[in-house]
Amino acid sequence: MKIADAPVFRRFWYPAMPVDALKDGPKAFSLFGEDMVIWQAADGTVSALVDECCHRSVKLSLGETRDSSLICPYHGWEYDVAGKVTLIPQRPDVPPPAGARVKAYHAAARYGFVWVAVEDPLTGIPDLPEAEAPGYRLIQEFHEAWDMSTFRLVDNWFDLAHVAFVHRETQGDTSRPVPPHEDIEEFDFGLISRASVVIANRAAGQEYTGIAEATTVRTRVATWWAPNCRKLHITYPNGLQHIIFTAATPLGDKRLLFTQFCIRNDREEDIPAEKAIAFDRRVTTEDKDILEHTRADVPIMPGETPEQGMPTDRAGNLARKKLRQIIETYSPAMEPA
Ligand code: FES
Ligand SMILES: [Fe+2]
């Protein structure tokens, strides 16, 4: 199945674009087939509305923002962040009728991005305490389209077995193909996996960890918030924490918006941000180059043709099971025939 096959996935938060992208006016965005205009009012509130004026249907994303209003480019009707028309310039003394409004989607600004949910969200935007904690810095990394299914990226997040092969140029070592044991804990809308992984620490890795040895150990806690967000909290033996947060926003059956930033407990003068970004760029590109050559659909529901497996697929299989449970729990019951 694909993420758009189950309507329940419209009830989660997805990052759409950097808040900074709204500085020069409203922007168009599309999620699960819903065309929306995303814009920011003067007080900083972000808003996502149906991208179609309720007067003569022109795209509001072609308009402009002024103070707390989004202004339609056709006849100048003004909208507030909730999608209500507050002014019809041709009738300035008459309040607009109650029906003069467009639907508002859920929108919020967090971690430098505008997040949107098409329908009432079942969970919140993931909480990342380190993002605001003293002693940590948030480094923006990537926000770009990748050609793969969201579910294939989720598989990859929990896949300790691919590191030796896919990342053999950066941190993997094909002479150590057997991944370590991992402890997996479930919560309502996700999973937590804990493991200590020996990795190769080559020159580029040494530059971003500050560790000189040829191998090192990553103590990693991976938290997945279904269906689309993952935090990988890595602690190195020298105390460095490199926390990677990644989110997928589905753009199509085999296309997603890949958003990633990292949070570190070091300082710019210790390791420049550009070194951390450069290393994560290499690692993410290694994943991308493999994942873009996988199938668009992933067997999640009963009746779909299963794939072969091995014991180290356990976390990925649990993630698929969690997705199945969410679909079954939140899908309307079938009427008896
Ligand atoms: S079409 Fe938007 S104001 Fe007329
Ligand atoms: Fe990977």
Image (spheres, rainbow, N blue to C red):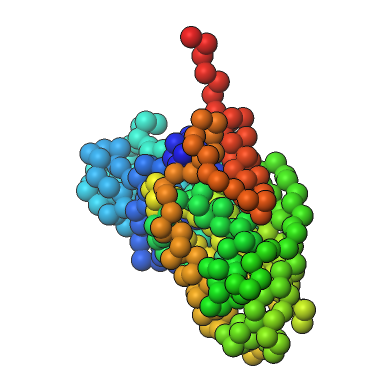
Q: Position of residue 18 (x, y in %)?
A: 46, 63
Residue at the far front: name it. Answer: 175
> Is residue 70 rendered to the left or right of residue 43?
left
Residue situated in front as seen by the camera: 309 or 197: 309
Q: Position of residue 109 (x, y in %)?
A: 54, 57
Which residue is located at x 46 percent, y 59 percent?
291
> Is residue 185 rendered to the left or right of residue 319?
right
Q: Position of residue 152 (x, y in %)?
A: 50, 52
Picture layout, residue 154 above or below residue 241: above
Q: Position of residue 123 (x, y in %)?
A: 63, 43
Which residue is located at x 55 percent, y 68 percent?
165
Residue situated in front as seen by the camera: 195 or 91: 195
Residue 42 can be seen, yes or no? no
> Is residue 316 rendered to the left or right of residue 18?
right
Picture layout, residue 198 above or below residue 17: below
Residue 30 can be seen, yes or no? yes
Residue situated in front as seen by the camera: 96 or 288: 288
Residue at the far top: name it. Answer: 337
Disc tally is 0
Figure quadrant of residue 175: bottom right
Which residue is located at x 66 percent, y 71 percent?
176
Picture layout, residue 270 above or below residue 237: below
Which residue is located at x 51 percent, y 80 percent?
278
> Is residue 141 rendered to the left or right of residue 293?
right
